[in-house]
Amino acid sequence: MDETASPAERRDNLAREVKAASRVTLIGMVLDAVLGTIKVTAGALFNSQALLVDGIHSFSDVASDLVVLGVMRISRQEPDQDHPYGHQRIETFGTLVLGSILIAVGAALAWENILRLIQGEANIVPGWPVLVAAAVSVAGKEWIYHYTRRVGQAIRSELIIANAWHSRTDALSSVVVLVSTAGAMLGFLWLDVLAAVVIAGFIIRVGWKFTWDSVKELVDTGLSPDDTRMLKDIARQTDGVRNVHELRSRRMGHDILLDIHLVVRPDISVSEGHQIGMQVVRGMRDALDNIRDINFHIDAENDEDHRPTSGRLPDREEIRAVLSDRVGELPANGRLRLHYLKNKVHLELFFDTGTDSHGLDAERIRRVLAEYDWFGSVRVWVGGP
């Protein structure tokens, strides 16, 4: 999603993404229902336990497609007051549910067919229509896999991509049915039931991958060490950045959220520090195009090298009051700049040429403020900004 887009453009983009996801999911759901009916019917009529299990797998795809349709509509809503980062985590939860369904279906089918192997119930030769049904399934599921994956990548949806891989497992399981049926027709009758167990294993494996990846995202697992190292290198190589002492990352759907602390020179302006941060943002977005948000913090010193500067140091008004009381009132056109470094306050006073500084020279201020434990140093500049 382009963060520079207007709200209306973002709404249009979200609507297009939901429409594309819904269309490909509906097409896949219809295909799954048709293939599931063909496979369950052919498996039951022509004595193929493997094809029957494969058909049940297809019907589980129909159920998962319904989950995808519901979740996509919710997860692609715009950010709101209660969800300022958006609703992508709902998509992650949907992927978790989908993976859990696959594990449950796969485990039940595997257990049933393992019992059949142990009890020696594989004694009927499958009929040739089983081969036709499996071949049709391979072609159909391979086509929908490529179509769905292409759409998922285009709209950057992990849930749609996960659903595509779900279709790929169905195609692979139908390949197993083809091989096992051919073997059973050649006399190896146990291959049909063994194939059913293998297909169930496919289902469990894919379900576990979806589930585990979703759990890692829901507990805010960060980027890989390699990606983290790359992003830190980009920041360090940006002109004006002295060091990077903290980078935290987390995922929200396909998007990445980053928090980073950038150490810059302590004497630069606020606006220059912000501009340096924006240069870091640009470099990181060029490296990873799915970074949604980068929250950068500009530091004037590295907090990892020593104790962080205390929040109890006096603020600007308190320091001006001390100067006014002990040294004299600051001229109206005089400017005071403060630097908070290593738990000390360092002062800079600026006077325009010809301005009466009322005796506010550096040596006098230094003597007066030396008794304050927060005082670090003072400089007085005359001649303009």
Image (cartoon, grey):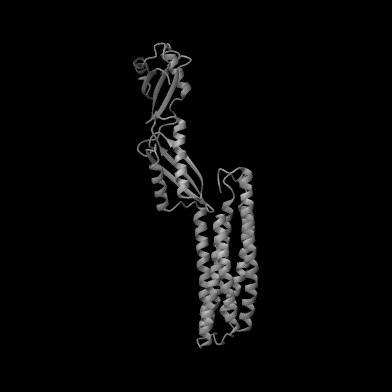
Viewport quadrant of the C terminus: top left
Horizontal and vertical percent position of residue 85? 57, 46
In depth, the one of 321 and 16 nearer the eye is 16
Q: Residue at x 46, y 21 (%)?
A: 318
Picture coordinates of residue 29, whole percent (x, y): 64, 66
Relative depth, front residue between 219 and 356:
356
* Quadrant in the rendering for residue 4: top right
Q: Position of residue 298 (x, y in %)?
A: 44, 36
Vertical placement of 49 versus 13: above or below?
Answer: below
Q: Is residue 124 left or right of residue 237?
A: right
In the visual, does 91 lie left or right of 287?
A: right
215 up-or-down from 105: above or below: above
Residue 61, quarter of picture: bottom right
* Residue 365 vertical placement versus 32 (above, below): above
Q: Is residue 365 visible?
A: yes
Q: Residue at x 52, y 61 (%)?
A: 211
What residue appears at the point 43 percent right and 27 percent down from the top-left corner? Answer: 313
Direction bottom: furthest residue: 187
Q: Is residue 157 at all visible to an observer of this figure?
A: no
Image location (x, y in percent) of residue 133: 60, 78
Across the whole image, how many numbered discs are drawn on residues? 0
Q: Tell me the residue at 49%/56% (across/down).
A: 216
